[in-house]
Amino acid sequence: MKVKILAFLFSVIICSVSSADVKIELPEVIGSWHMSGKFEKPLITEYNGENQGTVAYFTYSRNTPNGTLEVILTEGAGTGNIYIPESVGKSKGLMSADADFEILEISGHDALIENQSYLPLVLAINVSNNITLTLESQSLNKSEIINIAEMILSEWNVTE
């Protein structure tokens, strides 16, 4: 499963870069976190070269305590939804480290959280059809990253 999430994120990273408009914007401030960077690009398919959606990377930071939060928003026909299995648990992740996976529901949306000792904590949420919100941070624990996700989702009025 981790391989599927990482493969998707890797395929997003290697797509062609050009300017794009994100339909759903993230707030400049989320609690004590302030947006410190933003990068957007369209998703291009290998088959027909058409724009199949948008991926946007947002970086948030805070001073007390110091921390960084990466938020990735993908939306559009080519992005699909994250795969969430019926059950998960421990498995060997990257670098042979034990990884914990947990299926959650956050503000009514299916979500998957992954925790590995060598990588940031990752929370991926199916916001609606073809919209996925991913939060990553080495600075946050599980309850903090879920709380931030709930704050972001409460700002949106997303319908299928």
Image (cartoon, rainbow, N blue to C red):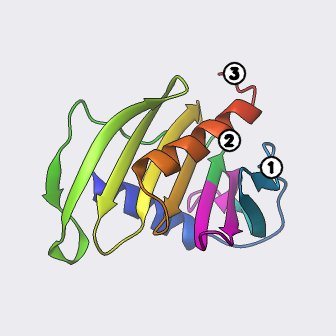
Q: Quadrant of the C terminus?
A: top right
Which residue is most to the front? 64
What is the x, y in percent for residue 2? 30, 57
Using a 10 Å C-alpha cutoff, classify the residue at mark 3 as few (fewer than 14 neighbours), some (14 to 19) or many (20 or more). few
Three-letter amino acid code of the residue under disc 1: Pro
Circles 2 and 1, Cβ within 8 Å, touching? The answer is yes
Q: Nearer the viewer, residue 115 or 132?
A: 115
Residue 101 visible, this orientation: yes
Q: Earlier in the sequence, mark 2 or mark 1?
A: 1
What residue is shown at x 52% (from left), y 22% (from top)?
A: 108
> Residue, x 32% and y 36% (percent of image)?
103
Q: Give residue 12's position: percent from left, percent from top.
A: 56, 64
Secondary structure under the numbered disc 3 in the rendered image: loop
Residue 132, visible in the rendered structure: no
Mark-to-mark CA distance, 2 and 1 = 8 Å
Say what secondary structure mark 2 lies in.
helix
User: Magenta segment range?
Assistant: 43-72
Residue 71, position as x, y percentages in the image: 62, 58
Measured as percent of width and height from the top left, residue 80 is found at: 53, 41
Does the magenta segment cover residue 61?
yes
Identify the residue position indicated by label 1 in the image.
Answer: 27
Identify which amino acid the numbered label 2 is placed on.
Ile
Vertical order, 140 against 153 (above or below): below
Q: Nearer the viewer, mark 3 or mark 2?
A: 2
Left or right: residue 28 versus residue 47 is right
Read off the residue under disc 2.
152
Label 1 close to label 3 by CB (< 8 Å): no
Residue count near mark 2 (Cα–Cα under 10 Å), binned few <14, some 14–19, many ≥20: some
The residue positioned 38% from the left and 33% from the top of the image is 104
Q: Reading the chain from its start, which is encountered first: label 1 or label 3?
A: 1
Choose the circle earlier in sequence order: 3 or 2. Answer: 2
Q: Which residue is mark 3?
A: 159
